[in-house]
Amino acid sequence: MMREWYTAAELAEMNLPGLPTTKRGIHMMAQGSWKSRPRKGRGGGVEYHLSSLPATVQAKLIVRSTAVEKADNPECRTDDAARAARWAHYDSLPDNRKAKAKEKLATLQEVETLRLGGMPVDIAAQQVAALRGVGLSTIHSWRKKVAGVPKADWLPYLADQYTGRTATEECSPDAWEMIKGDYLRPEQPNFSQCYRNLMRAAKANGWSVPSERTLLRRLSSSVHPMVVVLRRKGQDAALRMYPALERDRSVFRAMEAVNTDGHVWDVRVEWPDGEIGRPCMVGFQDLYSGKLLSWRVDRSENTWAVRLAFGDMVEQYGIPEHCYFDNGRSFASKWLTGGVPNRYRFKVKEEEPVGIVTQMGVQVHWTTPYHGQSKPIERYWRDLAQNVARHPAFAGAWTGNTVANKPSNYGSKAIPIDKFLDVVASEIAEHNARAGRDTRVCRKVLSFDDAFEGSRKQSPVTRCSDEQRRLWMLAAEGIHVSRTDGVVKLMDNRYWAEWLHLHLGEKVVARFDPDFLWDGLEIYRLDGVYLGHADCLAPAGYNDAEAARTQSRARRQWLRGVKMQAEAEVRMSPDAVAALIPPHSPTPAPTGTVVALPRPVHDLRRTPVQTLTPAQEARREAMVHEFPSPAAPASVADEKRQRFARAQAAEAQLAAGGTLSDAEARWLAAYQKLPEYRALAAVAAEFGGAEIA
């Protein structure tokens, strides 16, 4: 136990702060105000109680007394491992058991306070026990638990050490393995059904099996939840249990990095040709601010939509340094990202063309397929699907986000594509301008637009040139230039420029934006040489007189310019040209030295008559007699009669007792089986042999 009484000599020798260092000085400081008692033992004297000393002196004496007591009593020592184990056990307890330990600690602290005030321990314990309604023996048992333990560690030593019921009901090893094998499989069977299967097997094999609830608790406590999810729900579900990497996009600046992806709207729209379907949007989002920079809508996710959306972003905001692409077919097209060595789709060839994104010096990155966390734009699509796809203007056209989540008015309406685009454009602008965004950049204060503009003012912007702007336009190859007026026709529109007269009748390549056909075409030669821009010729109403006057005025001005150009080009009159042509003198006829004989002329239309000598005529007559004309072949009817007559002769010979050769007998047997024999025999029996002959 801690020492409570000290003599003046002992206090002086300890050289404690706040006390004199001599025995006389200690007595003078006490002067009857300190609690004292006569010292027992030889020499007598006076002892002073610990509670009478200054507070700093009390603290020093308590620390020294505890250290000496621990050093003298090995049983009271607490090493670091035991102390850590006690605190770990306390930390694992529920709050109700921790509260009980804190009540015990408060009780002992009250007893210790009274004891330090000079009250005997037994009396202090009795008073605290009566005040708190605790048994005196209980307080003494608590004091024994913390005997020799520093006060800072009393709390875990006062916590209950019981662990409850730990006995487990017996379960056969084979039964345990069977329930795990049946329950932990991808079909995700109900545990009750697995337990019924187990009981059937246990009855047949004599296994010992606990109750269903006991076995389920044992399975839940012994098999890790990660294993249960992996075995029952698959690898993807198990991966979702691992914390995702949180990427800080504030390391970028505006337009330093963008990401892109496609999104199929849950809205039925009607296209201009009457087809009804769900439109697909391709968009580019700034990674720093989260703002959607550009987007295009088409019937499906295709390379052309990606090209045009990329062009809109570059033309309005500039060229980014990094672009994070999905590894889909539309984004990995060689016309977009050709030349990137790590394009993990399609075969990368050395001779493939360099893509548009690669030509502009953008560093391409590929995100993990089917992993929405690697593309922040997926969150943007989710907001649009929740807030815009269910817009009141789309009532009746919303399809639901799953097959099982169709609304009751499914298929009752289809929104015209023009109206759909107007609503989407308005809602995207509102989404970008909404303040109080909860991101690291916006800090629940700014909007996507504010964060983007604030960073963009301080960031360098790389603008695209006119030549680069034409790269992302769509190309229509093999377009004919009219031989008459140089007009180029594309998608029921007419385009023209004066310089097209230099290419009348030729085939050219026209680059265009399908959503802005009225802006004109960029014309190239087939070998890729840029020729120029051709404006769109807008049609006019049949009775539009003002348009006719404007057209006539423009045509007169054009004709006047052509005439002036012609006058500037032709400076020599036809008379002057004729005067410069020298006259041509006739040349004398040549004298021939070789005379050709005339060729005989034959009448090829007359058939020539062949004349033979008497000897040739005699030889021809001899050959005619030697090789007479072949006799006419016998008819089919004659052949049938001959075969039947042969059969009758053979039968007559057999009837007369004669014999036939083996070959003749085989022929007769085979012939008698033929329909021909049976038919002729019936005719002979009915009408006699004369009819057959």
Image (cartoon, grey):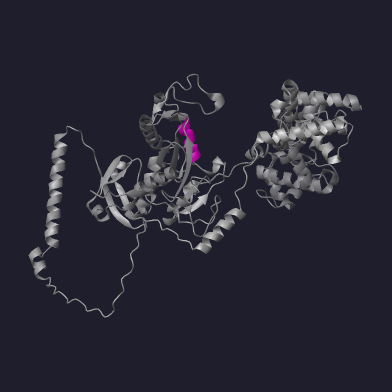
Which quarter of the picture shows residue 157?
top right
Residue at screen point 75% across, 33% down: 645
Q: Is residue 528 above or below residue 119?
A: below
Residue at screen point 33% across, 40% down: 491
Q: Quadrant of the N terminus?
A: top right
Nearest the camera: 150 or 522?
522
Please state the total of marks drawn on the protein image.
Answer: 0
Q: Is residue 159 visible?
A: no
* Residue furthest bottom in the image: 593
Nearest the camera: 166 or 511?
511
List x then y, in percent, for residue 335: 45, 51
Q: Quadrant of the C terminus?
A: top right
Asked if residue 229 is among those painted magenta in the image, a careful observer would answer no
Q: Is residue 516 visible?
A: yes
List x then y, in percent, for residue 619: 56, 60
List x then y, in percent, for residue 662: 86, 40
Q: Name the magenta segment's main secondary structure.
A: helix
Nearest the camera: 135 or 532?
532
Q: Is residue 392 above or below residue 22?
A: above
List x then y, in percent, for residue 416: 38, 28
Q: Which residues are magenta?
A: 377-385
* Residue furthest top in the image: 408
Nearest the camera: 411 or 492?
492
* Residue furthest right in the image: 206
